[in-house]
Amino acid sequence: MTPALPNLAPFPRARLRRNRRDAWSRKLVAENSLSAADLIWPVFVHDDGRKLPIPSMPGAFRLPIAALVDAAGDAEALGVPVIAVFPAVPAAKKDPEGHEALDPENLVCRAVAALKKAVPGIGVLCDVALDPYTSHGHDGVIREGYVENDETVAILCRQAVVEAQAGCDIIAPSDMMDGRVGAIRDALDREGFAHVRIMAYAAKYASAFYGPFREAVGSASSLGSADKRTYQMDPANTDEALREVALDIAEGADMVMVKPGMPYLDIVRRVKDAFLMPTYVYQVSGEYAMLKAAAAAGWIDGEAAMMESLIAFKRAGADGVLSYFAVEAARRLKAG
C-alpha cells in the first residue's frame, strides 16, 4: 500500500528571489538609481600655493585656486554637474563682523571667477554664511551674546550679490537666519541676478557631525566650545523641519536641502513627500570621516559602503547629494 503524502502547504508561486537571481534582473527591477548627475562635490580652497591634506577627512584637501580649477575639470569630465566652493580664510582676515565676506576680491570670488572662466560647463554653488569669515566662528554678527538675525540677513544679502557678481550659479544660504531666503532673492533680483538659483539649507540641524568641516575651513578654533543651537535646528524635531522648508519655499527657494544626511533620512522623506520640490541632502564631513576611518581600519568595505550610503539618500527621496565622495563615486559609476 502506497503511503499517503503529507499534507503540505502549496509551494509558493510568488518568489521574490527570482528577480534577485542575476545581476541583469536586479538592475531591471531596481527602484532607485544613482548617477554622477545626482552628485554635488564640496571642495575647499585656500590661498596657500600647496595642496594640503585635511587630516580628519582622508582623501580631501585644501586646494589652491589653480588646483581647484584642475579638479573641477576632472569632475566635469566624470559627469558631476556642480562643484560647491568653501573657503579656508586666513585668521588675519577674520573679524567679528565678517567683513571679508563682502570683498569682491575675496578667496571665494576669485575661485568662482577662475572656475567659470576655465570650466564654464560646470555649475558653481557658493555658501552664504559668515562663519568662515568671523573671528568667533558664528554664522552671523553677535550682539549682547546672541547672533542678531536681521542685521545678519542684511549682510548676507550683500554677500550673495558679491558672489553672484563673481559668477556663482547657485546661492546656498546655510546660516539658518529667519527670512534670509526672501531677502536674498529680492537682493539678487534688484541687482540683475534673477537667473541665479537659491538652494536653501532649509532644514539644517545643530549636529555633532560637522567637526571635520570646521577644521577644513578653519572655524573650529574660532568657535571653540560654543555651539549654534540658537539658530540651527534641534535634532529632536521633525515637524519644525517642515515649517522651515515651507517658509523657504514661500520666500523663493528654487531647491531645498536637508543637512546632515544619514541620521536625517526621515526628514528627507518627509520633505520630499510634503513639497515635491527639488530636494537635496548633504552627506557631511563627519559622515564621510566615519566611513573613511572604518574602511581604513578594515572594518567595512569602503567602496561598497560609500555607494550604499549614496543610494540610501536617493531611496529616501533626495534628488541629489552633496558629498565629499562625489568624484570617487563618479569614477566608480563610470567603471560600471
Image (spheres, rainbow, N blue to C red):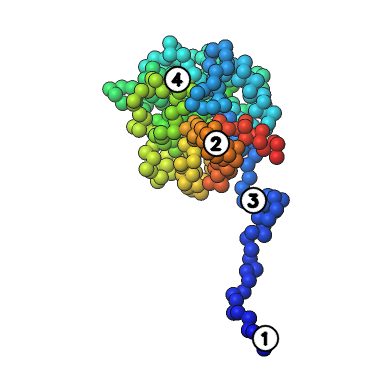
Under tag 4, what secondary structure? loop
Identified by mark 3, the residue type is: Ala
Q: Which residue is mark 1?
A: 2
Query: Of marks 3 and 2, which one's residue comes earlier in the chain?
Result: 3
For image coordinates 54% across by 27% down, the residue present is: 58
Under tag 3, what secondary structure? loop
Pick the residue in front: 69 or 186.
Answer: 69
Are the residues at dot 3 and dot 2 in contact (C-beta closer than 8 Å)? no
Q: Is residue 270 left or right of residue 193?
A: left
The span from disc 3 to disc 1 (Cα, nearest Å) is 48 Å
**Mark 1 packing: few (<14 Cα in 10 Å), some, or many (20+)?**
few
Q: Is residue 190 visible?
A: no
Name the disc covering residue 298, or none.
2
Query: Of marks 4 and 2, which one's residue comes earlier in the chain?
Result: 4
Identified by mark 1, the residue type is: Thr
For image coordinates 63% across by 45% down, the residue present is: 33
Q: Which residue is mark 4?
A: 218
The span from disc 4 to disc 2 (Cα, nearest Å) is 30 Å
**Relative to 296, residue 69 above or below:** above
Q: Is residue 36 left or right of residue 47?
A: right
Residue 224, percent from left and from top: 36, 23
Pick the residue in front: 136 or 11.
Answer: 11
Residue 37, percent from left and from top: 64, 36
Dot in front, 3 or 2: 2
Query: Of marks 3 and 1, which one's residue comes earlier in the chain?
Result: 1
Query: Of marks 4 and 3, which one's residue comes earlier in the chain?
Result: 3
Q: Quadrant of the C terminus?
A: top right
Under tag 2, what secondary structure? loop
**Mark 3 packing: few (<14 Cα in 10 Å), some, or many (20+)?**
few
